[in-house]
């Protein structure tokens, strides 16, 4: 609690502890995690400014190999980037088979994506990209093709999550990659470090 309150107020602490308790009550594996890993995960919530509120879907407590790991969705990473003033705005998008999509890098980079309405319930993701608008108006983006997405999936320990939420995980991977091109902030660094430790 003391470490948490060094960063945020007691009201935020009380809310996040309630969300954390809910996560533990619903997950036997989390209850068996080491005390130190639980403490670190909760403190990292304060350090990043994300929330464990399940309705917001920003951050999650995940049991992995006896440790409690703090995981972030792409929404959580985007919130952290904006709140830490690393960027003015940031978003990530999945590109599905049949979409009109093209981009160019170099001295005059551009990106064009025109999604189509899909009648297929599960269209295949063929790419993902993340775009950030910096405070001086310059836009940065990264694109991951299918091969890069699959490489990220194979190296991750969260195979079940990838299978259930492939497009969301692809977008998160794009945001993580884009982070390397953005102004560095402590909050974003803590979030990406936490992800890299268990992914």
Image (cartoon, helix red, strand yellow):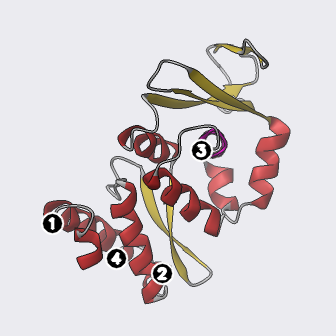
Do tag 1 and tag 2 residues touch (Cβ < 8 Å)? no
Whether residue 3 is visible here, answered yes or no, is yes
Q: Is residue 126 magenta?
A: no
Of the two numbered discs 3 and 1 in the rendering, the one whose residue sits closer to the viewer: 1
Q: Could you tell me how far apart the alpha carbons at marks 1 and 2 are, in whole angstroms?
A: 22 Å
Q: Could you tell me how far apart the alpha carbons at marks 3 and 2 are, in whole angstroms?
A: 23 Å
Circle number at residue 25: 4
Q: Could you tell me how far apart the alpha carbons at marks 4 and 1 are, in whole angstroms?
A: 22 Å
Label 3, on which residue?
A: 172
Please tell me in which quadrant of the rendered image residue 20 appears. Answer: bottom left
Q: Mark 4 or 1 closer to N-term? A: 1
Say if 93 sits above or below 8 in the image: above
Q: Could you tell me how far apart the alpha carbons at marks 3 and 4 are, in whole angstroms?
A: 27 Å
The kind of secondary structure element at disc 1 is helix
Q: Viewer-proximal residue, 41 or 85?
A: 85
* Pointer 1 local density, CA inside 10 Å: few below 14, some 14–19, many at least 20: some
Q: Mark 4 or 2 closer to N-term? A: 4
Label 1, on which residue?
A: 10
Residue segment shown in magenta: 171-179
Residue at 82% from the left image edge and 50% from the top image edge: 151
Q: Mark 1 or 2 closer to N-term? A: 1
Say if 98 sits above or below 9 in the image: above
Q: Mark 3 or 1 closer to N-term? A: 1
Residue at 64% from the left image edge and 62% from the top image edge: 196
Label 2, on which residue?
A: 37
Q: Main secondary structure of the magenta part?
A: helix
Whether residue 124 is visible here, answered yes or no, is no
């Amino acid at each position: 609690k003391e470490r948490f309150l060094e960063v945020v107020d007691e009201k935020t602490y009380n809310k996040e502890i309630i969300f954390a308790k809910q996560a533990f009550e619903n997950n036997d594996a989390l209850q068996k995690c080491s005390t130190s890993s639980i403490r670190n995960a909760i403190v990292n919530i304060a350090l990043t400014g994300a929330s464990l509120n399940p309705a917001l879907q920003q951050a999650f407590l995940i049991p992995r190999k006896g440790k409690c790991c703090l995981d972030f969705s792409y929404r959580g990473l985007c919130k952290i980037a904006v709140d830490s003033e690393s960027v003015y705005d940031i978003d990530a998008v999945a590109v599905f088979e049949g979409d009109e999509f093209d981009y160019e890098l170099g001295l005059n980079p551009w990106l064009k994506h025109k999604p189509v309405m899909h009648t297929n319930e599960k269209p295949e993701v063929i790419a993902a990209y993340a775009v950030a608008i910096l405070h001086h108006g310059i836009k940065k983006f990264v694109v991951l093709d299918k091969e890069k997405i699959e490489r990220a999936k194979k190296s991750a320990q969260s195979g079940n999550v990838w299978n259930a939420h492939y497009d969301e995980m692809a977008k998160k991977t794009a945001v993580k990659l884009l982070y390397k091109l953005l102004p560095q902030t402590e909050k974003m660094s803590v979030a990406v470090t936490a992800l890299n430790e268990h992914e």
